[in-house]
Image: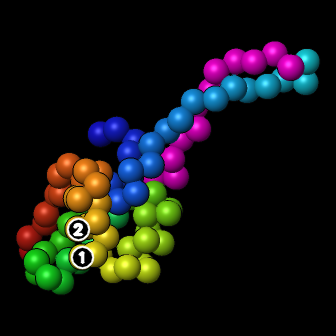
């Protein structure tokens, strides 16, 4: 699984390490990514999402259902793992 947030679409970007002598070497800025299980009340099921810290704040602010619908409209959400207990 690639390092992409399924809610916000954030992904790793590249940049430079700059030394004291101003030499530049390539590096990656990775996303602060977590794999979390959420209970989706509208569907009555558990879902597993790869979300960034910003994605967690978005879910807390908007709610899970609204955040998933918005991510699906923008094309960030490719698949959802559902868990039935």
Quarter of the rendering containing residue 3? top left
Residue 2 belongs to the span the image colors magenta:
no
Residue tagged by mark 2? 69
Magenta stretch: helix, strand or loop mostly: strand
Mark closer to the observer (1, 2) = 2
Question: In what quadrant of the picture does the N terminus appear?
Answer: top left
Residue at 43% from the left image edge and 80% from the top image edge: 61
> Furthest residue to the right?
21
Residue 65 - label: 1
Residue 42 spot, x, y in % from top left: 14, 82
Magenta span of residues? 22-35
Residue density around tag 2, few if under 14, some if 14–19, many if 20 or more, within 10 Å = few
Give the answer, above or below, for where 85 lies relative to 77.
below
Residue nearer the viewer, 13 or 82: 13
Q: Magenta segment: does it hold 27?
A: yes
Q: Which image quadrant for residue 64?
A: bottom left
Residue 75 x/y as whole percent: 25, 50
Is residue 35 something one can see in this rendering?
no
Q: Is residue 20 visible?
A: yes
Q: Residue furthest front?
A: 73
Tell me, yes or no, whether the two marked residues, 1 and 2, touch with CB atoms within 8 Å.
yes
Local SS, label 2: helix
Label 1 crowd bin: few (<14), some (14–19), many (20+), radius 10 Å: few
> Would residue 56 be found to the left or right of residue 84 on screen?
right
Q: Position of residue 63 (x, y in %)?
A: 33, 80
Q: Quadrant of the C terminus?
A: bottom left
């Amino acid at each position: 699984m690639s390092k992409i947030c399924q809610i916000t679409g954030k992904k790793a970007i590249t940049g430079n390490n700059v030394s004291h002598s101003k030499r530049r070497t390539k590096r990656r800025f990775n996303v602060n990514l977590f794999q979390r299980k959420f209970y989706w009340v509208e569907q009555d099921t558990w879902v597993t999402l790869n979300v960034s810290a910003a994605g967690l704040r978005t879910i807390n602010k908007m709610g899970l259902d609204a955040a998933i619908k918005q991510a699906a409209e923008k094309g960030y959400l490719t698949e959802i793992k559902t868990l039935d207990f």
